Image (tube, rainbow, N blue to C red):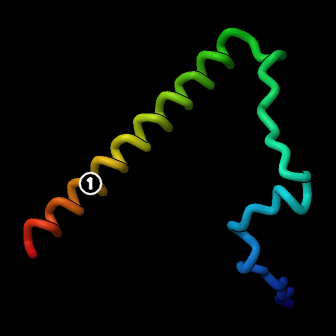
Amino acid sequence: MLLKRQIDFGHTMRDNGKEMYGGEIFKMDTSNLDKQARAHLAIYHNFMTVSKIVGGLIILTLVIMAATLL
């Protein structure tokens, strides 16, 4: 027997911060992390920063390529 669950895709990616939390920004509490966990978190932050830069460069390259084709 298959159970059907209703999936609401309309609110999946919306920012519900104002409705749920009053617009507060919650940061991760890193006070109880050990040295290794802080190192892993730093690696994650560095990876995400590099990913944003690479993504921006790819978009910039595509825009330049499209502009030169016109």
Secondary structure of the residue carrying numbered label 1: helix
Q: Residue 50's x, y, as percent? A: 41, 35
Which quadrant holds residue 65?
A: bottom left
Front-most of residues 37 and 9: 9
* Mark 1 nearby-residue class (10 Å; few <14, some 14–19, many ≥20): few
Q: Quadrant of the N terminus?
A: bottom right
In this view of the protein, which residue sits in the foreground, 22 or 45? 22
**How many numbered marks have been drawn onto this rendered protein structure?**
1
When asked about the image quadrant of residue 51, the answer is top left
Figure check: 8 above or below 67 = below
Asked whether, in this view, residue 50 is left or right of residue 18, the answer is left
Q: Is residue 70 above or below residue 44?
A: below
Along the line of sight, the residue nearer the viewer: 1 or 46: 46
| Circle 1: residue type | Leu
Residue occupying the far left of the picture? 69
Q: Which residue is mark 1?
A: 60
Task: Name the residue nearer the viewer: 21 or 37.
Answer: 21
Residue 60 x, y percent position in the rendering: 26, 54
Q: In the picture shown, does residue 37 fall above or below 52?
A: above
Kindly identify the residue that appears in the image at 82 percent across and 26 percent down.
29
Q: Position of residue 52 (x, y in %)?
A: 43, 43
At a point 65% along the width and 13% down the height, the residue shown is 36
Quadrant of the rendering where the C terminus is positioned: bottom left
Q: Position of residue 39 (x, y in %)?
A: 60, 16
- Horizontal side of residue 47 vs 25, given as left or right: left
- Judge from the rendering whether residue 20 lies leftward or rightward of residue 16; answer left or right: right
